Amino acid sequence: MAVKSSESHNNAMSYSDWAPFNKDTISKAPEKAGVYFLGSEHETTYIGAANNIKKILEEHLNTNDSCIKGAVSFCYHETLFPEAEEEKQLTAFQYEHGRLPKCNKSI
């Protein structure tokens, strides 16, 4: 399954479990600010920030973006500073993998 950066684990942040990327599981996501991860079978494919996690996941589920449509799972972390956390997670991912997640265009 997709793996978040080790840095996020070192900071003892509380992330949700990975869940199937579908209408039922997204309906249980919080309507709060946070950072979220989309994944394929073996990797994190997108890292994003939102003021409403549930709303953005619903939008991604209905997108025409073929890269995002390939997601099969998601997880999230609620935070008051989603953009800062997103930048931190993208930087950590790039450091670990030498690239951004395949659906992220740039930091």
Image (cartoon, grey):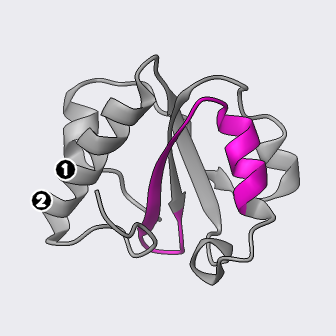
Residue furthest bottom as drawn: 66
Residue located 80% across and 34% down the image: 28
The quadrant of the rendering that contains the C terminus is bottom left
- 79 left or right of 6 in image: right
Residue located 78% across and 51% down the image: 58
- Asked if residue 44 lies in the magenta stretch, the reply is yes
Q: In front here: 81 or 3?
A: 81
How far apart are the two marked residues, 1 and 2, measured between alpha carbons? Answer: 5 Å
Q: Amino acid at mark 1?
A: Ala
The residue range painted magenta reads 39-60
Please say if the residues under marks 1 and 2 sit with CB atoms less than 8 Å apart. Answer: yes
| Location of residue 83 by image quarter | top left
Q: Is residue 88 above or below residue 95?
A: above
Q: Position of residue 81 (x, y in %)?
A: 40, 22
Residue 49 visible, this orientation: yes
Residue identifier under label 1: 92
Q: Amino acid at mark 2?
A: Tyr
Residue located 57% across and 79% down the image: 67
Residue identifier under label 2: 95
Residue furthest top as drawn: 80
Q: In front here: 43 or 59?
A: 59
Q: Position of residue 25 (x, y in %)?
A: 79, 46
Mark linked to residue 24: none
Q: Position of residue 33 (x, y in %)?
A: 57, 25
